[in-house]
Image (spheres, rainbow, N blue to C red):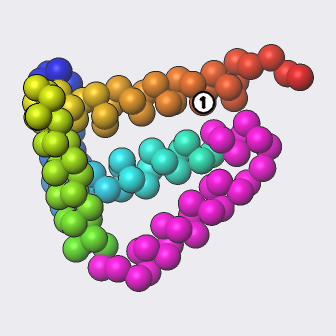
Amino acid sequence: MDYFFDLTYNFLKYLERVTGLSYEEINVIIWFIGIPFSWSILIDKIYQKNYFKIGFTILILAIVSLFDFENFSKILFNTSVDFLNFFIVFGSTYKTTSVIICLCIPFLIYAFLIRKVYFSKAS
């Protein structure tokens, strides 16, 4: 688990250097905006509608216009760290919980949605 955490962390630090955004902002953009938005696209493909991606876009635009994104990202990132640290009481480490919740679970959701979109039999 440490390997995947370190690999992800180093990639995010690279993006921080390249983009000039903070580590917290990059985390929020990827895990709270990018990944859910891509899921909304896949869900819309399943239902052949545009409701999810339009609704998600409106939500993100509202948040970005109402809040200072840098400060918002710090608060959301720190709340996420607190959530991941909560699992220490169950014997997990921060790195292990991060990999499970931030990498494995999204991967499983992608696998499910992609299967539904591209590999389900047409009715």
- The number of numbered badges drawn on the structure is 1
* Horizontal relation, residue 31 to residue 99: left or right: right
Residue bearing the label numbered 1: 113
Q: Residues within 10 Å of mark 1 (few under 14, many from 20)?
A: many
Task: Determine if the magenta segment contains residue 50.
Answer: yes
Read off the magenta span.
42-68
Residue 62 image point, x, y percent: 49, 76
Image quarter of the C terminus: top right
In the displayed structure, 52 sits above or below 119; it is: below
Asked which quadrant contains residue 107, the reply is: top left
* Horizontal relation, residue 51 to residue 78: left or right: right
Asked which quadrant contains residue 67, the reply is: bottom left
Residue 76 appears in view: yes
Residue 80 image point, x, y percent: 23, 51
Name of the residue lying farthest toward the front: 89
Front position in the image: 52 or 82: 82
Q: Residue at x 27, y 55 (%)?
A: 26
**Looking at the picture, which amino acid does disc 1 mark?**
Leu
**Mark 1: secondary structure:** helix
